[in-house]
Image: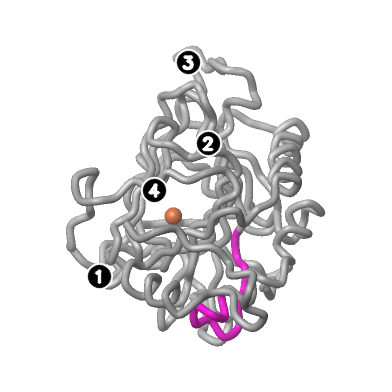
Amino acid sequence: MSSPASFSPQSKHSLLSAEQLEEFSKNGYLLLEDNVSDVFRHALIDRAYRLIEQADLSATNRFSTTDRAQINNDFFLESAETVRCFFEEKAFDDGGELTQPRAQSINKTGHALHDLDDVFREFAKRPEFGELARELGLSVPHLYQTMVIFKQPRIGGEVTWHQDATFFYTEPSSVITYWFALEDATLENGCLWLEPGGHKGPLRERYFRDDLDLSMVALNDTPWPDESSGTPIPVKAGSLLVFHGHLPHYSALNRSDRSRLALTFHVVDGQHPYAAQNWLQCPTLGAFAL
Ligand code: FE2
């Protein structure tokens, strides 16, 4: 892996150097260390846990990428324009009781934090996030989804290999992902794994919405990477990983005693039509311009 990139303090007019743009083009991702200040990071973490405290939780609302049948479609689809908390699939014992405290049982919260929550909105409005997207080729950056993924100790679930353009389809493809490490991400607590250069491959799947029905449709049978062909990307708290919508990525179960909170943004180019079949639709809130 090439050396981590950082925003250049010398440059007034561009955040990314020519080398960083070349690195993104070659590998499909960039690591920008020290992107989130400790003050913002702790504010975001505190707010995420406050959202869990305030949430009206039902045991039926779980999230899983290994078994999507566990997802309550109505609850999930409604989360596009509100803020919802989803339980880990392994949060409950056979008797239906939580095996860990409620705060340590949540898989993620989202998906309109940038619109509806003061702390997350203040963070999302940082001008450099729009500038970064524009420098990576998006003419009209629109933020469509924010979520905090908790990756809780011992039960933090695996996120299977996927490409984010599967879920945020535009023609042509334009989605990029901002993945902020709110805590250190390590091999032990489930850091991201990427396939450097894999963004040059085809989109393998598309997640379709038909009213309240959701389905995953295979588009291409290119094999997914695995832990022998992918690269783990351990990062320090405060780092930002930016990656291309076709870049395959994955994270393992968290079997450690430490959580691995991350905040993600999915940003698409508003100059291209946003597919009406994408699961996440914002008819009321509209697109959030970065
Ligand atoms: Fe993803």
Q: Residues within 10 Å of mark 3 (few under 14, many from 20)?
A: few
Going by the image, does 12 lie left or right of 121?
A: left
Quarter placement of the C terminus: bottom right
Asked if 229 appears above or below 88 in the picture, the reply is below
Nearer to us in this view, 42 or 289: 42
Q: Between disc 4 and disc 2, whose residue precedes? A: 4
Q: Between disc 4 and disc 3, whose residue precedes? A: 3
Image: magenta residue range: 133-145
Asked if 195 appears above or below 38 in the picture, the reply is below
Q: Amino acid at mark 1?
A: Gly
Going by the image, does 75 lie left or right of 248?
A: right
Q: Between disc 3 and disc 1, whose residue precedes? A: 3
Residue at numbered disc 3: 93
Residue at numbered disc 4: 233
Nearer to us in this view, 179 or 73: 179
Queried whether the magenta region covers residue 272, the answer comes back as: no
Tell me whether circle 1 and circle 2 mark residues in contact (CB < 8 Å).
no
Residue at numbered disc 1: 201
Nearer to us in this view, 285 or 198: 198
Which type of secondary structure does the marked residue at label 3 adopt? loop
Label 4 and label 2: CA atoms lie apart by 13 Å
Tell me whether circle 4 and circle 1 mark residues in contact (CB < 8 Å).
no
Q: Amino acid at mark 3?
A: Asp
Q: Residue 123 at what x, y percent from top left?
A: 73, 58
Q: Between disc 1 and disc 2, whose residue precedes? A: 1
Residue 42 showing in the rendered view: yes
Which type of secondary structure does the marked residue at label 4 adopt? strand
Nearer to us in this view, 137 or 82: 137
